[in-house]
Image: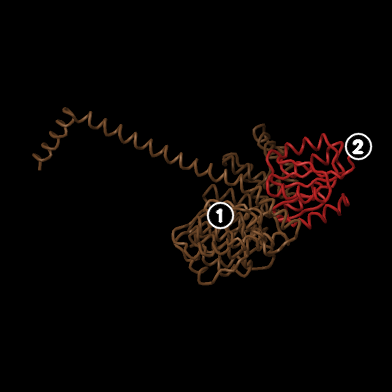
Chain colours: A red, B brown
Amino acid sequence: MVNDKKRILVIEDNEILLGTMQFVLVREGYDLLLAKSGKEALSFVSDETIDLVITDLALPFANGYEIIDRIRRSNTNNQVPVIIISGYRDDNSIVEGFEVGANDYIKKPISPSELISRVRLRIGHA
Amino acid sequence: MLSKIEQAIYSIRSFFEGEGWPILVTIALAMSFLLWTFCLIGITIFYYRDYRYRSYQAKIYPVLRDFIYEHILIENRGSHFPIDRLALDLDKAIVQKVVRNILHEFIFTIGGEKGKSMRHLFNEMGFDKEAQYEIRHAGNHVIATVRSLSDLALMEVEIQEEVLTQLMNSSRTEIRVSAFKYLLQVRGEQAFDIVLPRIEGINELDALDIYQAIVSTDYVGTYAFSQWLDATKSFAVNSLIMDLMVYYQQLDEEKLWQLVVSDENSQISLKAINALGKLLARDSEVRLVVFYSIERSLHVKIEIIKALGRLGQGKSIDLLENIFKDESSVLALRKHAYRSLVAQKPYSIARLRKIEDEVDDHDYKLIRYVNHPMVHYI
């Protein structure tokens, strides 16, 4: 049987936030791939088909900007929408995020209902 | 007098010629044994407490997480939480500490309506009262007070003015800085006039903490931070104010120049020159060129050259070119002069072409080094 659920790659090293996003998004019916570091995330980017990426910026091994850059240069997932979730609130970080190819930016602390709305806006209901 | 000294020398000699050495060795061994024993006891206590905290956290975290998911994320409950169902022994200090820390992390991470509900949960568990109690009895309990202020700031709970004033006047800098951060987080811009006149005595790390607290707020106004610049104050204070001026792009050339020319602290002068460059104080370009000619310190000269590069209006390209061409000059000066010339494009394009045509092998290496993409201009 083919799994037709929309698949989201969530990259976050904070266990509490990762767990909460997992709980909220799985409950909405999305299929999730979870990565706690840039390295794990990059292996998913090259091996899996993904509908949306949600990434933090400060990550071990490869930061969020590098991950987005790699996604945009990958063969399989270069068109996938990317949402940044970050504690950086300065304009430069936000602008740089959009410049490397992000589609949206959510500032921490995140509101679960806002997250769901933005995910639906990008890829629709699960 | 001499006989007394002779007697003392005699008794010392006889002590060491007799049983002296064995006694000393025995005492040294005993002390060494005691020292190692105390060290091992200290390390054991540290690891035991850490292990105890972790084991409690491993048990409590899943329970508390599921409770939050069930009641806040699914049921959308905002108050009257069935805390009894948690079945946690909240009278135990360690359990209380772990629960409080986990909840703090949740509130720090999750915002919006759900974040508010978590704040209510925190209050219903009595941690707000505990935090209020801890700050009222601050005394020398620095860690507890700092943690409580951080919790209360996160909960946006109002603290009585009287208590807050006491904390801001505390003899412990850590407590004062936490009180400042609380005020900035809770009251935002309204706290600037209370906090900024009182920050004397903070160190550079504290300054960084206060800077983060200010830039994390949603403040975008035009508050004149430069009014708190003062060469007689410490470097940390002036550095914080200048960082804020740069962050909010508020240029006050006169105030900065007062710091540049003051003899109070060379670090402050350097930072002020740096700020002039970062704030694009274009009227200062000529003044910096003049200041370069009278200044003797290498560090100040380098900072001036860097600032000229940032200002980049072509009024200083003669000076920069001369510094680069002067082979007797220090290499660091020449390197920065070339970088600043590059930064002054398009005014400096002709000069750069001329330099590239004229340079010898040694200087060509220097130019290649500066132009290399990995060596970016700071």
B307 horizontally vs B40: left or right: right
Q: Is residue B233 above or below residue A97?
A: below
Q: Chain of mark 1?
A: B
Residue at the disc numbered 2: A1
Residue A89 in view (yes/no) = no
- Is disc 2 on the same chain as disc 1? no
As shown in the figure, which amino acid type bears the numbered disc 2? Met
Residue at the disc numbered 1: B96
Distance from disc 1 to disc 2, alpha carbons, whole Å, reads: 48 Å
As shown in the figure, which amino acid type bears the numbered disc 1? Gln
Q: Chain of mark 2?
A: A
Q: Is residue B39 above or below residue B62?
A: above
Residue A99 in view (yes/no) = yes
Quarter in which the N terminus of chain B is drawn: top left
Quadrant of residue A106 within the rendered picture: bottom right
Q: Is residue B30 above or below residue B249?
A: above
Which of B154 and A5 lies nearest the eye of the viewer?
A: A5
Mark 2 neighbour class, 10 Å CA radius: few under 14, some 14 to 19, many 20 or more = few
Quadrant of residue A32 within the rendered picture: top right
Label 1 residue SS = helix
